[in-house]
Amino acid sequence: MLIPFESLQADIQEIEQQVLLSLTPLDNVDPEGYPGCDTVAELNVIVCGKPAVFTVGFPEQFPYELPRFYDKKNVFGRIPHKTDDGFLCFTRNESLIIDHRFPGSILLNCLDKVVEIIEAGLKKENESDFSKEFEVYWFNKKSTRFYASIDTHNKNVRELDLWVKDLGKQVFVVCHEKGTHSEKTIEQIFHIDLNGALKYRCVYFPLQEGTLLIPPTESKQWDYSTFKKNTLENLTNENRKIFTKLISKPVGNVKPGLEFIISGIPLDNGHTALFGAYIVGNSIQTKYSKTHKNKRIQPHPFSMKPKKDGIEKAPIERWHPNHLLNRTGGNTELTDKHILIAGVGSVGSEVANRLAKAGIGKLSLVDRDLMKLDNVHRHSLGVDQVYTTEDGFLLNKPKVLGMKEELNRKFPFTEIKTYFSSIFTVLEELDIRDTIDLLIVAIGSPSTEILINQTLHYLENPPPTLYTWVEPLGIGGHTLVTLNQNREGCYQCLFQPDAEGQPIKNQSAFAEAGQEFAKSITGCGSVFTPYNFLDSERSAMLTVEAALKILTGELSGNPILSWKGDDRLFNEGGFITRKRYSFSSEKLDETKYLYKDDRCPVCSEGRDLHPNSGKERSLSFTSQ
């Protein structure tokens, strides 16, 4: 503890409070009982109106770390949020800002929370927390861990595919829903080849709503009878019938000797607590009189008590995609969505990577460009995806194939389809009206994108479409939303003259038209537009955010979305910005729908009757 204990006591005495009666330091304390603490004290505290004694441990960095409270003498019995060693869990402090100037207040504030938890436990007001914390209680460092991919939304009793492989120093147990993942996926995630692994029977028991199980303790573990009773008595009538029918069927190609069980407790927050166990199984050899062939029967241990009826509990390490998304802020509503990305260069590759991370179920990637070494510092792919060998030749790898390999490696639950061809060819081949939920165009070629825009608007029911691009030298980037709920506002609308008789310009641009930004290092073969990976990533983030809002119904209409960057390099190069660059972020947001051209030949109601002048709308959009 960084402060003297006497100073802490003096600080507490100056605070008016009615909870802590006394604080007494303890000598000769076993440090293993208070891990991470260098000072331990006994607390005399008012709990439920009566004095009670428990202990507090002060970490070495207190008051920069919170104190830790223990009921070592089991004064309060079995209550939620108390572990087997008496530790009382009362808060998570990863994001907590601790005012270290007032150590006495820190102790008392923490003590108030601990007393609230103890009193709620004694009054049985928080018994449901046993279920929420069940996985923590079930955990044991020495237990064999099950790596399980289980769809907890499926409330039926069922068999899972399960393999066991001895790695030498560890036994690897992995299971998943039947028919949902290949051995290749398991090898990809865990880097373990299942060749030679043994397959056993595993049954998943989803317990019914309202189930309350008090978890076992180290000193009082569940025996076979308790485990069976807690499982079967908490099944719905329908699941009892399913289980009876399930175990009456002949056993498939699984090994005898062990039976694996995983149970799920539904929580009031919509999630499910999982815990597993394995039991020595039953195996009976029978003989058919007609065929004289031996047949093995495996009665489930819940239907026939095995000779060795001890259970070995096992914590569950989950790898189902829905759980991973929930755990990390993804959206399970996106797992059935299909997005087509045209162009997987610097911006498009970052868009694809982020959409896979968000949990999109299927991505189709379209690009006929090859990956090159000079791409890697602003592309999501690295040098390992530049080359491939084929028929004895060293070749540059198509970007779509490199992206597929990279995304499959990192996000195996997203299906990746690739098209090493023109977007127009793909649009002709695919019935995108029925198969695509969203189209993202990241080609960066206005002429091509104008034609894509026209092609899509001529379709009867096109998907929502986003166009995204980056401006040079870090001054900004844009994402245009089109065909989102209505057709008003499209890519063509952006290209209007500043005045009648002048050439058309992209009215959303920050850079004045007609300037030459392309650079060359070694001649015409090395021409490129100067912007860096940060610009690509900012545009990708803007695009992905818009895409996810469209898919979840949170974004309406067809706005032009823009981000502004620093113009230092732009000015140093002697370049000129347009008036729109001077807009504040608030003004960019306020004017995001004003680009629409009422006389647009593509998206306006009178597109077959009126020429594309757009003069008034152009001026109003850039001079608000």
Image (cartoon, grey):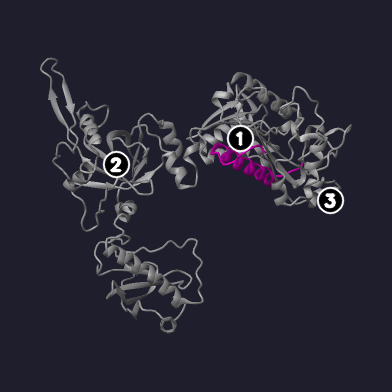
Q: Residue furthest left?
A: 289
Element at label 2: strand
Would you place residue 566 above or below residue 57 in this image? above
- Give 613 or 305, whichever is nearer the viewer: 613
Q: Crowding at label 2, few (<14), some or many (≥20) Cα neighbours within 10 Å?
A: many
Q: Which mark is residue 385?
A: 1
Q: Quadrant of residue 407?
A: top right
| Cα gap from disc 2 to disc 1, whole angstroms | 41 Å
Position of 426 relative to 77 (above/below): above
**In x, y percent, where is residue 267?**
34, 48
Q: Nearer the viewer, mark 3 or mark 1?
A: 3
Which of the two discs, 3 and 1, labels the residue nearer the N terminus? 1
Q: Position of residue 61 (x, y in %)?
A: 46, 71
Residue 572's label in the rendered image is 3
- Look at the image and tell me in which quarter the N terminus lies: bottom left
What is the span of residues highlighted in magenta in the rendered image?
A: 530-558
- For disc 2, the marked residue is 262
| Cβ atoms under marks 3 and 2 closer than 8 Å | no
Return the x and y of residue 49 as percentages of the image width and height: 28, 74
